[in-house]
Amino acid sequence: MIMKTRSYILGLASLCVLAMTPLRGADTTTLDPEGYIRDWLVLAPIPLPEGADAGELLMRSQVPEEAKLKPKTGDAVTVNGRQLTWKAVTAPTNHLDFNAVLKSQNDQSAGFMVTYVECDREIPDVIIAVGSNDQGRIYFNGVDIYAFSEARPLTLDADKGKITLKPGINVLVFKVINLQNSWQGAMRLTDRAGKALTNVKIRLSP
């Protein structure tokens, strides 16, 4: 476990240019050569109350049962009377830029990135490295494993921890809050030596 000021990331040994780009052709894809996840289901923007504390908002649910999200492309969600749709996105670089995806500037907003990691056996000691602009929270297989509650610029691999991938489908839900200006999230999966996992597939359906 790694602890940082106003953040946490837990190891779970027991749980085993820029524009929106359509998902690459196949039903399953892979991590990029450095281990970054580029294929995501994205739900955004979810407007947040002006002047509210972003750290407190981060720890609240913006959608029902957000820890257990298992969306598919085209699924609709109504949030505060507004309907949003999950969209498949392939990030053109090692991070996802929400404003670029939405083709608009969105301040005081929350968004979700969800992906499914498939493997044919248990993989322990997987290093998960994350960065966000601004606040970020991660659920892994329905369990809250990470939160960073302060405003910050995107720094790749800002926080790291360990997870165990179980055989079959593993669900990663990454919530990112933007206060103003840039709005980004990045995540990669590597082995203990820092090399990209090669024995997993990325899916956008459960």
Image (cartoon, rainbow, N blue to C red):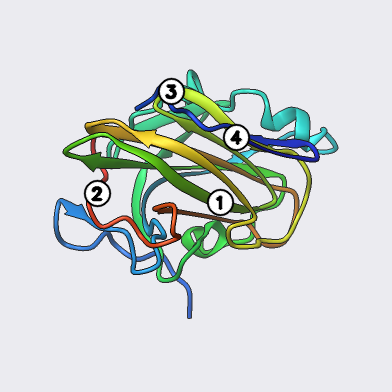
Of the residues under marks 2 and 1, which one precedes in the sequence?
Answer: 1
| Relative to 80, 25 lies left or right | left
Of the residues under marks 4 and 1, which one precedes in the sequence?
Answer: 1
Residue lying furthest front: 193
Mark 3 secondary-structure assignment: loop
Q: Residue at x 55, y 30 (%)?
A: 145
Q: Residue at x 23, y 38 (%)?
A: 205
Amino acid type for the residue under numbered disc 4 = Tyr
Q: Residue at x 44, y 36 (%)?
A: 163
In front: 42, or 102?
Answer: 42
Amino acid type for the residue under numbered disc 3 = Gly
In 3D space, how far apart are the residues under numbered discs 1 and 3 (Cα atoms)? Answer: 18 Å
In 3D space, how far apart are the residues under numbered discs 3 and 4 (Cα atoms)? Answer: 12 Å
The x and y percentages for residue 182 are 67, 62
The residue identified by callout 4 is 146
Question: Callout 2 environment at 10 Å: few (<14), some (14 to 19), or many (20+)?
Answer: many
The residue identified by callout 2 is 200
